[in-house]
Amino acid sequence: MHYRLTFSHWIGCLIGMLVVVFSMVASELSHVHTRPIDFVCDSEARRMMNKVKDLQVEMVVCSAVDALPSDIKLPCIRIHKATWERKSVHEQRAEILLSLGTLAQDVRSARTLSQPGCGLTLLERLEHSINNYLHVVRLLHIEGEQVGPQAELCLGRPSKDLGLVLKHFGLLLTGKLEWVIAEMAKGC
């Protein structure tokens, strides 16, 4: 009986991993490259690039991801409207880049400490998604931008909860980043 439970557990894990791999391939093929102008002027391109919901679904399938092997500093997601609006678009963009860069670094660290399996695959996909946003946001041309402004890093508390990390990443994208894009989209 013990052999059957072990074998059925192994089959369940294998099926779970195959679901994660297939959904990963499908989601990556759906929108491989987004140009910065598309990112600013086309909300559908931004929606297609946002893989947070896909990762959250895969996290449910991958029951192995209970706790991350190391802490990830959560980006600050709250916006004090008056303070945010006093910042230039350059400063807002620099703050987002700093948050994304720190998040990518922490996810990379957690990934290197992870065991092979669906948890590792999820962290790889999350890191890839964050790096895509870093690339696009770095390439965004802001009229009159000269030297990159210095930004103050605002970090939330550290967390080993992948669900909370995904939530904060998603809120960074739909909050601060969308506010910057809305300002830049006036030129579309």
Image: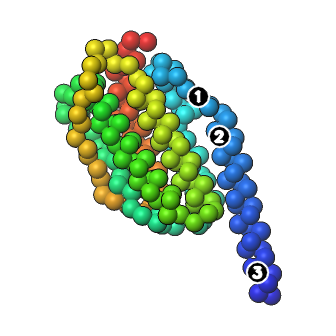
Viewer-closest of 164 and 69: 69
Label 2 element class: helix
Residue 5 is labelled as 3
Q: Amino acid at mark 1?
A: His
Can see residue 165?
A: no
Label 3 element class: helix
Residue 10: where, in percent of width, then height? 74, 71
Residue 182: where, in percent of width, then height? 38, 23
View extreme (top): residue: 187
Q: Nearer the viewer, mark 3 or mark 1?
A: 1
Which is nearer the N-term, disc 1 or disc 2? 2
Q: Nearer the viewer, mark 1 or mark 2?
A: 1
Residue 86 is labelled as none
Identify the image quadrant of residue 30. Answer: top right
Q: CA distance from mark 2 to mark 3?
A: 33 Å
Residue 185: where, in percent of width, then height? 40, 18
Q: From what the image shows, is residue 80 above or below residue 187? A: below
Question: In this rendering, would 28 be left or right of 7?
Answer: left
Q: Amino acid at mark 2?
A: Ser
Residue 27 is labelled as 2
Label 1 element class: loop
Question: In this rendering, would 3 be left or right of 157?
Answer: right
Q: CA distance from mark 1 to mark 2?
A: 12 Å
Indicate the quadrant containing the C terminus: top left, top right, bottom left or bottom right.
top left
Label 2: few (<14), some (14–19) or many (≥20) C-alpha neighbours in 10 Å = some
Residue beneath disc 1 = 33
Cβ–Cβ under 8 Å for marks 3 and 1: no
